[in-house]
Image: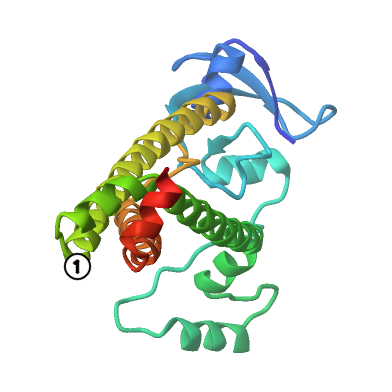
Amino acid sequence: MLLLAPACLSAQALDLAVERRFAEAARLRVGDTVWVAATADAPERVARVAAIIEPLADPATIMRRDYRVRMHLPDLAALLGQPDRVDRFGVALQPGIAIDSAADRLNRIAFGYEAFPTGMIASQSSTTFLVVSRFHRAIAFISILASAIFLLCLMVLKVEARRQDVAVLRFIGISRRTIFRSLMIESSLIAMAGALVGTALAAVASTAVNAFYQRSFSTSLLFSLLQWHTVRNAIALSILLGLAAGGLASWRLVRTAPLTLWRRAG
């Protein structure tokens, strides 16, 4: 725990880098001086706000809403009364060195610490996000299945409403193939229009979600990301489903005798 309180400048003042959110909440500016202590009953030291920083957005800590302050390592060790002690640190490897082999070698000579590859740590800390990702995939699959059924019903109703028109075209000698092609073109245009409208709604919703949660959590983290390959796949899937639904409904209509279509229309 790090306690801060206003103080007068001292020659031995420590330098602090204060997170922007903390600076805004505590109304701190560069050059202000504060008292800092590890606990409420620990000795206090005078510190100076040397910088206001914006840490990189981290999804793993966004819900904690902790305020963070950075100090020089010797100053922090002296303030905590625990010199030569750290919780964790990172080791940068030279290009070409295998991460796993380096971690194994460090663990063989380790005393008081254990080395882990960064990929393993990231995988363990991202378990929650993997579960959420799988949940989103399940929702997406159910949504696609439901939309395909709805689209098929819609195209069947729309094509069935053209029974009289198709019967007249058949009476005047228009071939089944020509009628089928025209209905397929109409289905593809409807599917394309629906895909464009859906993409626009997704872009608006994504922008609104980011604006709301970025303001709520005071972060630059993106909570909703609309990527080009997602838009491309959604448009392609929409067109394919539209063509499939339109094709089934159109094929059923053109195979029906013109007189039958005319009686149904009447």
Q: Nearer the viewer, residue 195 or 27?
A: 195
Q: Position of residue 207 (x, y in %)?
A: 41, 31
Quadrant the N terminus occupies:
top right
- Which residue is depicted at the point 26% across and 55% down? 183
The structure residue drawn at horizontal position 52% and vertical position 21%, both measured from the top left corner, is 48
Q: Quadrant of residue 203?
A: top left
Using the image, determine if residue 254 lies above or below residue 157: below
Q: Residue 146: x percent and y percent?
A: 56, 55
Q: How is the image coloured?
A: rainbow
Q: Position of residue 104 (x, y in %)?
A: 55, 87
Q: Is residue 89 above or below residue 55?
A: below
Residue 16 appears in the figure: no
Closer to the camera in the image, 120 or 71: 120
**Few, some or many C-alpha atoms within 10 Å of disc 1 (few <14, some 14-19, many ≥20)?**
few
Residue at 20%, 53% in the rendered image: 169
| Relative depth, front residue between 259 and 73 | 259
For this orientation, the residue located farthest to the right is 41
Which quadrant is home to the C terminus? top left
Q: What residue is rendered at 58% in x and 40% in y?
A: 75
Secondary structure beneath label 1: helix
Report x, y in % for residue 15: 50, 29
Which residue bears the numbered disc 1?
177
The amino acid on which the numbered mark 1 sits, given as a three-letter code, is Arg
Residue 17 is left or right of residue 124, and the answer is left
